[in-house]
Every structure is written in C-alpha cells, then in structure tokens.
Image (cartoon, rainbow, N blue to C red):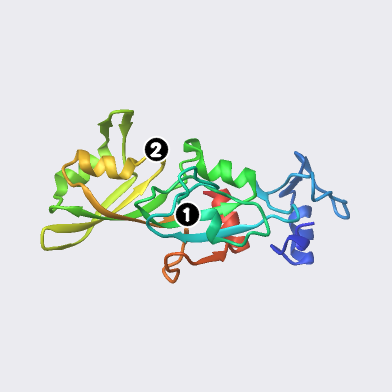
Amino acid sequence: MIAHSGLASRRAAEELIREGRVLVDGLLAHLGQKVDPETARVVVDGVPLPIRPGLVYYLLYKPVGVVSTASDPQGRPTVVGLVPPETRVYPVGRLDADSEGLIILTNDGDLAAHVAHPRHAVPKTYLARVEGSPGRKALRALTAGVDLDDGPARALGARLVGKQGGEALIEVVMGEGRKREVRRLLAAVGHPVQALVRTAIGSVHDATLRPGAWRDLTLDEVRSLYMA
C-alpha cells in the first residue's frame, strides 16, 4: 500500500501501520490489508497519500502572455498546451497572463482544492519589480492590511530585495490568490508593479526552470503541498 506508492520501503510502511499512523477510509490500517487504489483514501500522519493510478503532477514555469486555463475563447496560448497532452490536467489556481512563474497542473482534484482554497492559506511567493523605492511604512502596510475594492487584503510577508534606478525588487508572500491581488496591493501602497514572477508555491520552488519549461513534482513535494 504505502510501499507501492514509492513513499516508503515495505519495512517502513509496516512500522507506520503498527504505530497506528495510517488510516484507510477513516479507519486504522492493519498489516496485510488490501486496498483499492481507485477508491480508497489513505492518510499517513494526517496527510493524504496520493495512491490512485494515473495521477500526474507538473510544475510549469508559465511565460508572460500564456493564460492559466485549460482553454481560451480568445485563442491565446494556455498552460495546458505547454505540458504533455496524454493526461487531461488542470491548473491549480491562476497566474495573470501578464505575470510569469510557477504554476502546478494536475488531475488530482483533492490536491488542487487543497492548494487553491483560501482556507488552507498555502503560501505563494512572488518577486515584484515596482516603481519607486518602498520604505518601511509601505512594507508594514502590506502585511498590516490594505482595503481593496473587494475587501481587505494583506501579505503574509514582504521584504525589500534590492533597488536600482527608480525601481525596486520586493518579495511578497501571499496566503490567498484573489484576482491580481499582488498587483493591487502594491499599487495601493504607492508602488505599481512593472513585472511579477511567482517563485514558490508552499515549499515547492525551482530556480532552474525557464519560461515554458516543466517537470514532474516529486512525491516529497506532493506531500509537502498536502501538509502546507
């Protein structure tokens, strides 16, 4: 069961079961138990275990100009068109067409709901090139909260990375993802965004990916997203 998922050796999996750390469909697992990977829900230490055959998880670096949907009525290129077509996948959350950076595509509906839902507040990290030179007051305002037209919003973290000329780089960590929220937050504190890159989703990051490139998520990364 767990060993077959690739997350543990058979001996380690048996130890987890003996310690009562594995649930199958809400009940304690037992040694030798048969599990239907198509329907069973397996949880280890409170974290769901992706065991269903055919699940795929892609980490894509979305380029500017590509939309974060499965299809687009305007005919623009989509993130789905940049990953292998053999399995039908969907983007987890959104990244504006004029922004770039990391986005996950998967056919695991449970993970998608977990990462995208504001209730779980899975952090997303962004690097923004902005107009002007933000001071401490502006950075404090980002984390204290700003009233936007669709309600209050705040960053989980914000720090100045560097300055050059009349612009600056700010790292912003968000716990939710309302439409163009990072851009609207920074504009509200007086520093409109010139360019925006998402650099991490939870603890998942990859500085080696270039625009348009993708790779499979590792099993450890999938578990880290469920745990986030």
Secondary element at image label 1: loop
Give the tally of numbered discs.
Answer: 2
User: Callout 1: 10 Å neighbours few (<14), some, many (20+)?
Assistant: some
Picture residue at 77% right of the left edge, 53% below the top? 17
In the image, residue 174 lies at what x, y percent? 37, 45
Left or right of 104, for residue 29: right
- Compared to 112, does 146 lie above or below? above
Res. 45 visible in picture: no
Q: Amino acid at mark 1?
A: Pro
Q: Residue furthest left?
A: 165
Picture residue at 67% right of the left edge, 56% below the top? 87
Q: Amino acid at mark 2?
A: Arg
Residue at label 2? Answer: 178
- Compared to 153, does 130 lie above or below? below
The disc placed on residue 118 is: none
Secondary element at image label 2: loop
User: Callout 2: 10 Å neighbours few (<14), some, many (20+)?
Assistant: some
Task: Work out whether residue 33 or residue 193 is closer to the camera in this orientation and state it.
Answer: 193
Image quadrant in which the N terminus is located: bottom right
Task: Work out whether residue 174 or residue 88 is closer to the camera in this orientation and state it.
Answer: 88
In the image, residue 86 lies at what x, y percent? 68, 59
Left or right of 202, for residue 188: left
Res. 151 visible in picture: yes
How far separated are the C-alphas under marks 1 and 2?
22 Å
Left or right of 21, for residue 62: left
In the image, residue 72 lies at what x, y percent? 50, 45
Residue at label 1? Answer: 77
- Compared to 106, does 110 lie above or below? above
